[in-house]
Amino acid sequence: MPSKGINDLRVLHPSSCRSRASRAELKALRAQINPHFLFNALNAIAGLIQDRPQQADETIEQLALVFRYTLRAAEKEWVRLDEEIEFAASYLCVEQARFGRRLREVLMKGGRHLEVSRRRFHALLEQMAG
């Protein structure tokens, strides 16, 4: 491999470095959270199958929407609020199967077309569910 000359080096702006570090951290966090979330969701669904098969079916559909959205939107930092609210509704449906009445949905009705940071919105969502 040829050595790089001084003209081949790029200087990164500090905000670019922070942004890249944040994205890498977020990807690592997703890799840890998603298997845990999936395991808990599948356990909740397994508990519903016998007594509430309709709710188990709905929870499976919502779980699929959660993971489909997560994969599709993984590369975006900013998304429309209505997309995040739809994701939140699916996520909370899955968590509702797990926590039952202890979980209360709190979703905004207005301003659905504003852009929000996915990372911050997901952190808020996790706090609401926890």
Image (tube, rainbow, N blue to C red):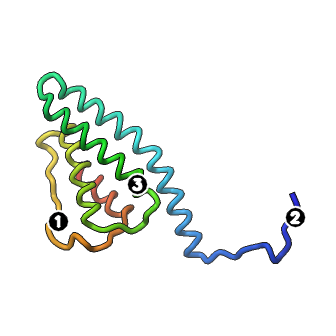
The answer to whether marks 1 and 2 mark residues whose Cβ atoms lie closer than 8 Å is: no
Give the residue type that dot 3 points to.
Answer: Arg
Q: Residues within 10 Å of mark 1 (few under 14, many from 20)?
A: few
Dot in front, 3 or 2: 3
x and y, in percent, of residue 22 in the image: 50, 63
Q: In this view, does 112 lie to the left or right of 1?
A: left
Q: Is residue 128 left or right of residue 37?
A: left
Q: Which residue is drawn at 46% across and 50% down?
A: 29
Distance Cα–Cα, label 3 vs label 1: 23 Å
Q: Residue at x 38, y 52 (%)?
A: 70
Distance Cα–Cα, label 1 vs label 2: 55 Å
Q: Mark 1 — residue?
A: 108
Which callout, 3 or 1, points at the residue further toward the start of the chain?
3
Dot in front, 3 or 1: 3
Distance Cα–Cα, label 3 vs label 2: 38 Å
x and y, in percent, of residue 24 in the image: 54, 57
Judge whether 71 appears above or below 60 on screen: below
Q: Mark 3 — residue?
A: 72
The answer to whether marks 3 and 2 mark residues whose Cβ atoms lie closer than 8 Å is: no
Give the residue type that dot 1 points to.
Answer: Met
Task: Provide the secondary structure element on which disc 1 rests.
Answer: loop
Task: Provide the secondary structure element on which disc 2 rests.
Answer: loop
Task: Provide the secondary structure element on which disc 3 rests.
Answer: helix
Q: Nearer the viewer, residue 34 or 129?
A: 34
Give the residue type that dot 2 points to.
Answer: Ser
Q: Mark 2 — residue?
A: 3
Q: Which residue is drawn at 22% across and 69% down?
A: 112
Quadrant (top left/top right/bottom left/bottom right) for the N terminus: bottom right
Judge whether 37 appears above or below 92 on screen: above
> What numbered label is drawn on residue 53?
none
Which callout, 1 or 2, points at the residue further toward the start of the chain?
2
Considering every residue shown, the one lying at the far top of the view is: 50
